[in-house]
Image (cartoon, helix red, strand yellow):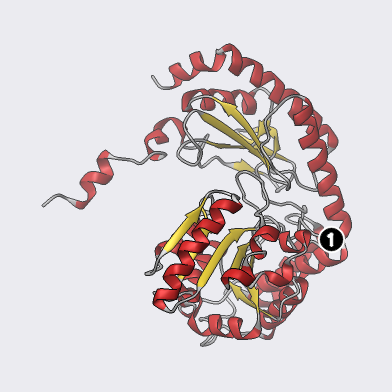
């Protein structure tokens, strides 16, 4: 019999094998200073494009005051216990009502974390007789939730409606045999590519195939739609989304998340979601802080307007310079380049140290081998000067990449 840790010591995994070269700089970097468009990295000020603070609420004075007042009044522990036992308050209920109203649903259920909540929600909504159909580019929390499912599950090619229907046909056949139903899962916004899920096209099949739709709208909530209610509102199909999910970790710049649906569905989730039944309640300071943030999203459309001014300036500027930003139709701005992992490290080092631009780097296995994805997240606190400097920097690093400069430097990094 082998020692359990033998494999772990020998095989660090596709990302872990780069830990020696990458840790502390490319992965687990330490950004310092107040969350903003400019922060410090390695002691130098950088333009920061890697913070999901879309509406600039993280350090808004009204938000800081609301958080501070709530912490002063209640501390960070209250309430103690799970919601079902001793962790329930009128403010948790108020936040649920206001979230439900904002996204045009009957009821909502507050959860502690988006990732944990999505995994548990999928497990709760389906039985072994049900079939899941989901986009193959879904976030890891969806994939992990689907893994818990004891029944059949099918993936369809990303945003490919022909592939979607083919898998619906397969799902319908099995569901008819088992006596179960079908749960379709899509993201409102796919966080790497920046593309909206094709929700309008998906719901057109509901009458024929009688499925229910769960949408993870982490990046759409607060950024898309006339009121900021997300991708469903943007596409005019919010009423066709059966279970709507959003996290507070993006536009709300906080902790927590919620599901919104018909009252009976939410009531079922409240009494059956194990991740919430057996977890401590979200601290009241965070709940009251979320109420303030939600109120600002509702009443301050200028935050969203400024966000989109910056998004359009950045994306249009990159496209004018010939950069490949994929099919993004959201705030998420991917820049696709070609190169291996050592080249990516050299490129990002140059970008951060010499051009003072900090953005996230994505490599294999998250994207295919031979590709480098630089992911930029515009916010309402960025400036047009930030945009101009960034586009100039990207033009400079692309030239070096194409000339092979980073290949030479990358080889030295690996030594």
4 or 151, nearer to the observer:
151
Q: Say which quarter of the image contains residue 358.
A: top right
Q: Residue at x 60, y 53 (%)?
A: 161
Which quadrant is home to the C terminus? top left
Q: Is residue 394 visible?
A: yes
How far from the left and from the top, in percent, is residue 204? 67, 64
Left or right of residue 341: residue 386 = right
| Residue corresponding to mark 1 | 226
Residue at 73% x, 25% y: name it.
Answer: 322
Count of marks, rendered view:
1
What x and y, as percent, mark residue 281? 55, 77
181 above or below 313?
Answer: below
Near mark 1 (Cα within 10 A), the count class, few <14, some 14-19 or many ≥20, is: few
Tell whether 282 sits left or right of 200: left
Relative height, residue 166 to residue 313 (above, below): below
The image position of residue 34, as x and y in percent, is 71, 48
The quadrant in which residue 250 appears is bottom right
Q: Which element is circle 1 on?
A: loop
Residue 253, can we see it? no
Give the residue drawn at x 69%, y 25%.
Answer: 394
Q: Residue furthest left?
A: 1
Does residue 318 appear to the left or right of 408 in the view shown? right
Drawn side of residue 82 relative to residue 67, left or right: left
Q: Position of residue 108 (x, y in %)?
A: 66, 77
Task: Give the camera-side residue of 181 and 331.
Answer: 181
């Amino acid at each position: 019999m082998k020692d359990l840790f033998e494999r772990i010591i020998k095989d660090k995994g596709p990302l872990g094998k780069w830990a020696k070269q990458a840790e502390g700089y490319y992965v687990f970097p330490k950004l310092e200073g107040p969350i903003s468009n400019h922060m410090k990295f390695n002691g130098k000020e950088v333009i920061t494009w890697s913070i999901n603070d879309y509406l600039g609420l993280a350090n808004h004075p009204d938000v800081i005051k609301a958080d501070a007042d709530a912490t002063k009044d209640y501390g960070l522990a209250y309430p103690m216990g799970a919601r079902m036992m001793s962790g329930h308050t009128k403010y948790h209920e108020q936040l649920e009502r206001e979230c439900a109203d904002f996204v045009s649903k009957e009821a909502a259920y507050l959860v502690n974390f988006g990732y944990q909540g999505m995994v548990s929600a999928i497990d709760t909504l389906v039985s072994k007789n049900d079939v899941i159909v989901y986009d193959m580019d879904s976030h890891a929390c969806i994939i992990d939730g689907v893994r818990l499912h004891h029944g059949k599950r099918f993936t369809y090619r990303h945003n490919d409606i022909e592939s979607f229907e083919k898998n619906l046909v397969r799902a319908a056949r099995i569901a008819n045999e088992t006596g179960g139903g079908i749960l379709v899962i899509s993201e409102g916004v796919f966080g790497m590519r920046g593309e909206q899920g094709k929700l309008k096209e998906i719901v057109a099949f509901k009458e024929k195939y009688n499925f229910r739709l769960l949408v993870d709208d982490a990046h759409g909530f607060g950024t898309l739609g006339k009121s900021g209610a997300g991708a469903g509102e943007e596409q005019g199909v919010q009423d066709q989304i059966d279970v709507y999910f959003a996290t507070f970790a993006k536009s709300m710049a906080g902790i927590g998340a919620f599901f919104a649906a018909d009252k009976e569905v939410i009531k079922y989730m409240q009494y059956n979601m194990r991740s919430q039944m057996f977890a401590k309640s979200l601290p009241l300071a965070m709940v009251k802080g979320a109420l303030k943030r939600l109120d600002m999203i509702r009443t301050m459309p200028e935050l969203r307007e400024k966000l989109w001014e910056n998004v359009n300036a950045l994306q249009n500027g990159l496209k004018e310079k010939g950069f490949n930003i994929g099919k993004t139709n959201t705030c998420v701005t991917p820049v696709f380049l070609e190169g291996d992992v050592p080249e990516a490290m050299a490129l990002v080092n140059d970008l951060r140290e010499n051009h003072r631009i900090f953005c996230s780097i994505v490599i294999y296995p998250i994207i295919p081998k031979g590709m480098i994805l630089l992911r930029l997240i515009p916010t309402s606190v960025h400036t047009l000067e930030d945009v101009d400097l960034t586009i100039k920097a990207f033009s400079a690093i692309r030239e070096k990449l194409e000339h092979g400069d980073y290949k030479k430097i990358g080889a030295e990094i690996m030594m």
